[in-house]
Amino acid sequence: MTIEVIPQTMGQQFGRRSWAEPWKIKMVEPIRMTSQADRERAIVEAGYNTFLLRSVDVYIDLLTDSGTSAMSDRQWAGLMLGDEAYAGSVNFYRLEEAIRNYYGYKHVVPTHQGRGAEHLISQAVIKQGDTIPGNMYFTTTRLHQELAGGTFVDVIIDEAHDPSSEHPFKGNIDLDKLQTLIDRVGAEHIPYISLAGTVNMAGGQPVSMANVKALRQLCDRYGIRIYLDATRMAENVFFIQEREPGYADVPIATLLKEFCSYTDGAWMSAKKDHLVNIGGWLAVNDHEVFDKARNMVVIYEGLHTYGGMAGRDMEALAIGIEEAVQDDHMRARIGQVRYLGDLLIDWEIPIVCPVGGHAIFLDAKRIYPHIPQDQFPAQRLAAELYLDSGIRSMERGVVSAGRDPESGEHRYPALELVRLTIPRRVYTQAHMDVTAEAVKAIYDDRERTRGLEMVYEPEYLRFFQARFAPLKD
Ligand code: PM9
């Protein structure tokens, strides 16, 4: 038998070099294919809200990248090292060390997930009547700021609100807008800048190193703190490495620590970047703020050495922190998101550009220009995608934006989007192909589709639980 030797230069002959995942699959979780009739029943039962679907009725679940990642064999092994002591667990100290190592902050408070940390930082530093400037709102973040008596003001660059702008750092703060705001409300009424990397609601768009450095200088002039929503910060620094001059050869781990060094602390939903199914933390440099947060955590989350997590969760998280900042992991992670984005761009389907870190965002305003925003075009688009092929996505438009607390009116964001969120290390390229083809089918059928009316609306974070019914012609 002769064995054909494939020349080393084969890839070059094809004129391309592909990325591939730096892992192989050891265990699989079967998923159920559904029929059209199953899906019609399920979406009606769910009130046309993809959050209310049962996961057993979902084929490819792109609702969120939150807590949906696949853990590595090292993380699963770490679960067996859980020290479930009520106080002073070994795993807490491992976690604290990992956060100090990779993020550089001095003091760590564990929480059950991101919003637990948002609650602590908001209650610890916001006073009634304060203003919190930030680079676009996030649903839970803004609500905690409002519940603590503050008002969030968006100071992101204008390009972030334009889905077709190709600006490489659409998450940047507009320093002129921030200066104008400081002049108007006074620095003493600004407890901190709420800086997110990447910016979820803008399409997973990054903040540049130059922007955070300039922000630091401006804030230092007024003694204003900067707190980072570090939920997808490892993804953010991938874009710095790729796009910002001078950083191409700097490892992601180094860039992450440098970026954080310009901030005073961070809150984290570890369910994203950190490759775990549950967990979060708050970390700050200021001892006084730490002291308040550490005291509050025992009221709302659990003792300050577990904060709502089991010891085994903290171990898996400590390992995930290290895995998240590996360059080859991040290249494959963003590579997969881009693979899906490129298919849609090739078919001229309107999406937010450039493609961001964790998801593809379909532009419902351009897909359904005939559906007014108060008939929830993105909510309808998410429902249509599910009906077509059992793919679950998430509305990120007028429903997510909620109502203005003063006027009670809907907030109408410039971006009316559907998010196809890619869990980390879970789906294959074939799943991305199936997803792109489903989106194409919905897009081709767009003119026939009508809007929705909201028939039930909860008071807080309505997108999770609101119910809708289709409007007739
Ligand atoms: N993000 C997401 O799907 C979870 C459900 S939607 C509220 O994108 C940022 C940037 C997030 C985030 C959650 C949280 C809250 C804070 N900041 O969900 O409480 O994307 O862990 O984190 C979701 P937790």
Image: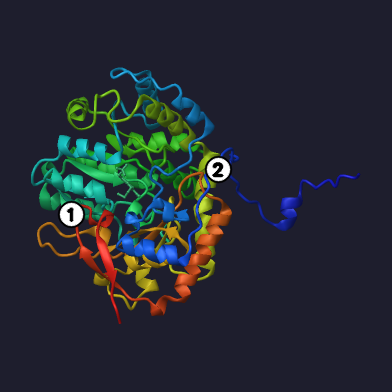
Name the residue furthest right. 1
Instruction: Work out whether residue 453 can be spotted.
Output: yes
Dot label at residue 295 = none
Assess disc 2: are there few (<14), some (14-19) or many (≥20) residues with their C-alpha within 10 Å of its C-alpha.
Answer: few
Please indicate whether residue 46 sits to the left or right of residue 341 in the image: left
The image quadrant where one finds the N terminus is top right
Please indicate whether residue 464 sits to the left or right of residue 191 in the image: right
Please indicate whether residue 128 sits to the left or right of residue 234 in the image: left
Point out the tag, 1 or 2, that comes first from the N-terminus.
2
Residue under pointer 1? 180
Q: Residue at x 42, y 63 (%)?
A: 39
Closer to viewer: mark 1 or mark 2: 2
- In the depicted structure, whether residue 100 falls above or below residue 442: above
**Rendered image quadrant of residue 231:** top left
The amino acid type, in three-letter code, at marker 2 is Val
- In front here: 252 or 330? 330
**Rendered image quadrant of residue 97:** top left
Q: Residue at x 36, y 74 (%)?
A: 368
Instruction: Work out whether residue 385 can be spotted.
Output: no
